[in-house]
Amino acid sequence: DIQMTQSPSSLSASVGDRVTITCRASQGISNNVAWFQQRPGKAPKSLIYAASSLQSGVPSKFSGSGSGTDFTLTISSLQPEDFATYYCQQYNSFPLTFGGGTKVEIK
Amino acid sequence: EVQLVESGGGLIQPGRSLRLSCTVSGFTFGDYAMSWFRQAPGKGLDWVGFIRSKAYGGTTEYAASVKGRFTISRDDSKSIAYLQMNSLKTEDTAVYYCTRGHGGNSVGSLDWGQGTLVTVSS
């Protein structure tokens, strides 16, 4: 199975901050990575697919990059509604696997 | 508007069976692959399984932890995906989500349902 190592597991940031979350795959997975946002008590929401493609309706403050084994999700200017947990996922091969999540909290 | 609504969750004893449904609207269900995920209380996301569209054979893939116990199927005439869960274990306790892929053979998760809670306990 492909392991997705996500870091940090949590971070504190202020409104307006630029935030970067990283994910490292245990083997090369091309660009087959997605990023999801999950607010407390809610279902996950798709943000990014194919490592850098923005889902329809997702604000452009979210961006993704990477290929191979190293991937990043960046939020350019954190807003109150962005405080949530973020997950990366590889879908290069079965079983699909997720990173452990990054909880973004208010500083 | 795309909607996915899971139903069928509840409290169930270990060893028993339960069937979850994912009823969709707002898109042509038969054209898309569907996936199931779960999230144990306070934990991260786990993939459960996947079914391709009929155009891609309607075949399925499963996580090792559920293979042989869980079965995913689809009824394109009703726009419903099912997750049949047999021989349930306490560790199957989780919120279960269904998702829509980007296409008939896509394991991506474009849209998510709101989830349904399954509690396995005696």
Image (cartoon, grey):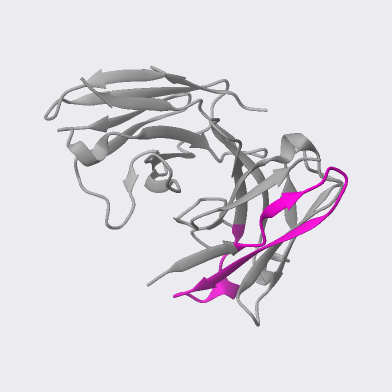
Q: How many marks?
A: 0
**A40, above or below B36, in the image:** above
Q: Residue furthest bottom?
A: B77
Return the x and y of residue A28 as percentages of the image width and height.
Answer: 54, 26
Q: Residue furthest front?
A: B122
Return the x and y of residue B57 as percentages of the image width and height.
Answer: 73, 66
- Say left or right for B98 vs B83: left
Q: Quadrant of residue A22?
A: top left
- Say left or right for A68 vs B66: left
Q: Is residue A9 magenta?
A: no
Q: Residue at x 17, y 37 (%)?
A: A79
Q: Is residue B32 magenta?
A: yes
> Start and end of the magenta stretch?
B7-34
Q: Residue at x 65, y 77 (%)?
A: B76
Looking at the image, which is closer to me, B71 or A15?
Answer: A15
Return the x and y of residue B89 as percentages of the image width and height.
Answer: 80, 39
**A81, above or below B43, in the image:** below
